[in-house]
């Protein structure tokens, strides 16, 4: 999701500059285009061997270099604010010597591992052996961008024709680091780069639930992307240009600030996060990203991006079972963010897509359909959160069942709402039936099968109980 919610989203025809790019590939690597569950960026499990290299070579940045990157773009008040923040030492650099003091298993600002914070490394998620040249990147994007490729150009110039001309001009200047005409191509699909996806096992141990396709972003020098977040692991590789990232950990105080800011922004009809919100965010990390470097952001790390040169990046997100409980905890943040779509149709479309994905991932976890991942601990957490009761003084407390009920109530399409409801309910029934083989009772409330409403078979009694008691969202 992108916070700069300019409504323009056009299919723009751009003259192709060629059929694709010629890139050298690893001879020992194969790619199955039908496989989308695994991805190739270094992962917490597959790339630990590279951690020492990553720390010594890329996790040794300092704020002086951050200021040098930002300095020439200070005519933008947001960049000037970022410069002052770095100059005042109110943000950490990506430097492990400094960050390690905040890493603790319990009660730490960050988790104990480097993978609990943004990780910058030199691994490329492609099958080619070296970074393509700016000319090759430009050629590939021009080949991919025409036809039925849906993407956004923001801010819009006011009409599809003007936007198309601006896009052509931007793409013609991918190799010009100082090109600064406003407007960026975002969320662009790229069949060329998707075909070059490099398959490296490693995420299975985290319980892979799904992965997005690669999406391209092309932005001019001086472009600023407003503060946003991703609910999944987010990997982005810089192909050309230079960027500075201000990233902030998912501390409850930070996420509360962001949620309240979204609500105020919606009421004020603006898409810009007030700088006073940024000034209150705690324990941020400033990161300089250069071509050939891949940045992996953990879920719910909010970030603001400053393009200090004309930049092209290739990104994807990856959902895992290990992070599923965070999606439940922060569901209200997503709902607040989704308010920024200009039309009710756009809002409902993204709401249905979000709820559908959530239900599918929920069903995958509850039915245990994950290889090389011990799903029982996550299932136990879900069971606990579904029926959890809050303290009496917590009037706004909602357990997981109540949050799902609110989410479903927001969906206007009755067929879509029933389909999502059915998927969640059937997943619960299948889970309960499997658990009944060990103990003849409901896993959530411990009511024994013989005490449930009458039915011809134990499975029928259990299904009726789950439907009436645990999957009924009406008060």
Image (cartoon, rainbow, N blue to C red):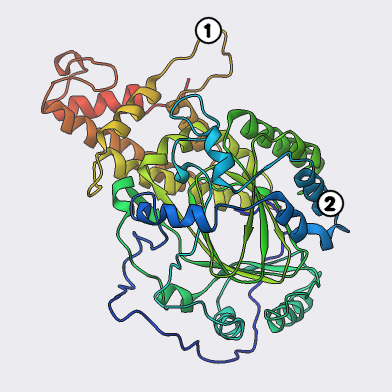
Q: Residue at x 61, y 86 (%)?
A: 135
- 154 shown above or below 149: above
Direction bottom: furthest residue: 18
Query: Which residue was labeled with disc 2?
Result: 80
Q: Residue at x 80, y 72 (%)?
A: 180
Q: Position of residue 442 (x, y in %)?
A: 23, 21
Q: Earlier in the sequence, mark 1 or mark 2?
A: 2
Which mark, residue 427?
Answer: none
Q: Position of residue 290 (x, y in %)?
A: 61, 66
Q: Is residue 469 left or right of residue 301?
A: left
Q: Is residue 204 left or right of residue 142?
A: left
- 330 shown above or below 200: above
Closer to us: 406 or 54? 54
Q: Residue at x 29, y 47 (%)?
A: 205
Closer to us: 219 or 282? 282
Q: Is residue 385 left or right of residue 249?
A: left
Task: Identify the image quadrant of residue 449.
Answer: top left
Would residue 345 be seen by someone viewing this image from the given angle? no
Task: Rate crowding at label 1 as few (under 14), some (14 to 19) or many (20 or more) other CA atoms within 10 Å.
Answer: few
Query: Which residue was labeled with disc 1?
Result: 392
Element at badge 2?
Answer: helix
Q: Nearer the viewer, mark 1 or mark 2?
A: 2
Q: Position of residue 12 (x, y in %)?
A: 66, 78
Task: Rate crowding at label 2 as few (under 14), some (14 to 19) or many (20 or more) other CA atoms within 10 Å.
Answer: some
- In space, the residues marked 1 and 2 are separated at their CA atoms by 46 Å
Closer to us: 343 or 69? 69
């Amino acid at each position: 999701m992108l916070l700069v919610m300019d409504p323009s989203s056009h299919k723009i025809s751009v003259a192709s500059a060629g059929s694709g790019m010629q890139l050298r590939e690893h001879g020992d690597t194969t790619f199955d285009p039908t496989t989308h569950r695994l991805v190739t960026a270094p992962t917490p499990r597959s790339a630990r061997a590279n951690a020492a290299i990553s720390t010594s070579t890329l996790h040794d940045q300092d704020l002086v270099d951050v200021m040098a990157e930002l300095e020439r773009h200070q005519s933008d008040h947001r960049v000037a604010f970022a410069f002052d923040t770095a100059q005042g030492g109110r943000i950490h650099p990506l430097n492990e010597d400094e960050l390690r003091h905040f890493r603790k298993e319990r009660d730490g600002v960050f988790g104990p591992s480097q993978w609990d914070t943004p990780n910058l490394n030199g691994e490329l998620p492609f099958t080619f052996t070296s970074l393509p040249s700016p000319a090759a990147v430009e050629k590939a994007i021009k080949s991919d961008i025409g036809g039925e490729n849906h993407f956004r150009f923001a801010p819009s110039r006011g009409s599809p024709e003007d936007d198309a001309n601006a896009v052509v001009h931007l793409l013609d200047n991918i190799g010009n680091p100082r090109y600064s005409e406003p407007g960026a191509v975002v969320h662009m699909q790229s069949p060329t780069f998707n075909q070059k996806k490099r398959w490296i096992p490693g995420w299975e141990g985290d319980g892979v639930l799904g992965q997005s396709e690669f999406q391209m972003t092309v932005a001019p020098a001086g472009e600023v992307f407003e503060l946003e977040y991703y609910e999944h692991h987010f990997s982005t590789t810089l192909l050309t240009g230079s960027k500075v990232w201000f990233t902030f950990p998912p501390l409850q105080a930070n996420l509360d600030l962001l949620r309240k800011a979204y609500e105020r922004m919606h009421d004020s009809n603006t898409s810009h996060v007030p700088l006073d919100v940024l000034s209150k965010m705690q324990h941020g990390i400033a990161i300089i990203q250069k071509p050939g470097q891949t940045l992996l952001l953990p879920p719910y790390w909010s970030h603001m991006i400053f393009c200090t040169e004309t930049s092209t990046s290739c990104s994807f997100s990856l959902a895992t079972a290990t992070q599923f409980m965070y999606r439940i905890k922060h569901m209200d943040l997503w709902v607040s963010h989704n308010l920024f779509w200009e039309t009710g149709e756009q809002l409902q479309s993204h709401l249905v897509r979000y709820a559908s994905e959530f239900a599918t991932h929920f069903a995958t976890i509850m039915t245990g359909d994950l290889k090389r991942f011990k799903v029982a601990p996550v299932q136990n957490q879900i069971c606990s959160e579904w029926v959890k009761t809050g303290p009496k003084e917590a009037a706004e407390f909602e357990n997981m069942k109540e949050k799902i009920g609110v989410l479903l109530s927001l969906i206007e399409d009755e067929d879509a709402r029933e389909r999502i409801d059915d998927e969640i309910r059937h997943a619960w029934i299948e889970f309960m039936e499997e658990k009944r083989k060990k103990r003849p009772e409901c896993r959530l409330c411990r009511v024994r099968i013989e005490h449930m409403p009458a039915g011809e078979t134990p499975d029928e009694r259990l299904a009726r109980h789950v439907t009436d008691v645990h999957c009924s969202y009406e008060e």
